Image: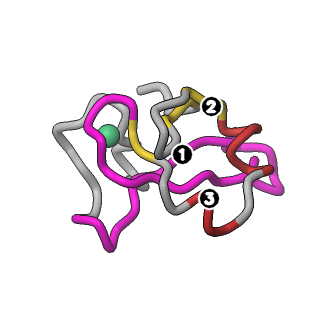
Amino acid sequence: MALSTECLTSDGKKVTVADALKLKRDQRRGLKCISCGQRVSPHRRSANGKQTAHFEHVPSDGGRNPSCPRSDPSRG
Ligand SMILES: [Zn+2]
């Protein structure tokens, strides 16, 4: 399953994970999953390069969302 690399900002604008990583912490709070609308947070590419930059659903907002096609099955 492809990792999510785009999300919506609080004002409904579509941004890539690269754009989201440039946002300030308080701006990142408004990021939402394109598919399910749950809050997501941007993650940088892993140091070993195995995982590309992507968004993950925020656990405090209900945890992983298995019904969301954008949800990473192993990490949320
Ligand atoms: Zn989602």
Residue position for label 1: 55
* Label number found at residue 30: none
Q: Rounded to the nearest whole Å, what is the CA distance between mark 3 and mark 1? A: 15 Å
User: Which residue range is magenta in the image?
Assistant: 34-62
Q: Rounded to the nearest whole Å, what is the CA distance between mark 2 and mark 3? A: 12 Å
In front: mark 2 or mark 3?
3
Q: Position of residue 21 (x, y in %)?
A: 74, 50
Q: Secondary structure at mark 3?
A: helix
Q: Residue at x 48, y 35 (%)?
A: 8
Q: Rounded to the nearest whole Å, what is the CA distance between mark 1 and mark 2? A: 11 Å
Q: Secondary structure at mark 2?
A: strand
Looking at the rendering, the quadrant in which ligand 1 lies is top left
In front: mark 1 or mark 2?
2
Residue 38 among magenta residues = yes
Residue position for label 2: 15
* Left or right of 50 in this view: 76: left
Quadrant of the image for the N terminus? top left
Neighbor class of circle 2 (other Cα within 10 Å; few <14, some 14-19, many 20+) is some
- Which of the two residues, 45 or 60, is positioned nearer the viewer here? 60
* Left or right of 43 in this view: 62: left
Q: Residue at x 47, y 46 (%)?
A: 10
* Label number found at residue 27: 3
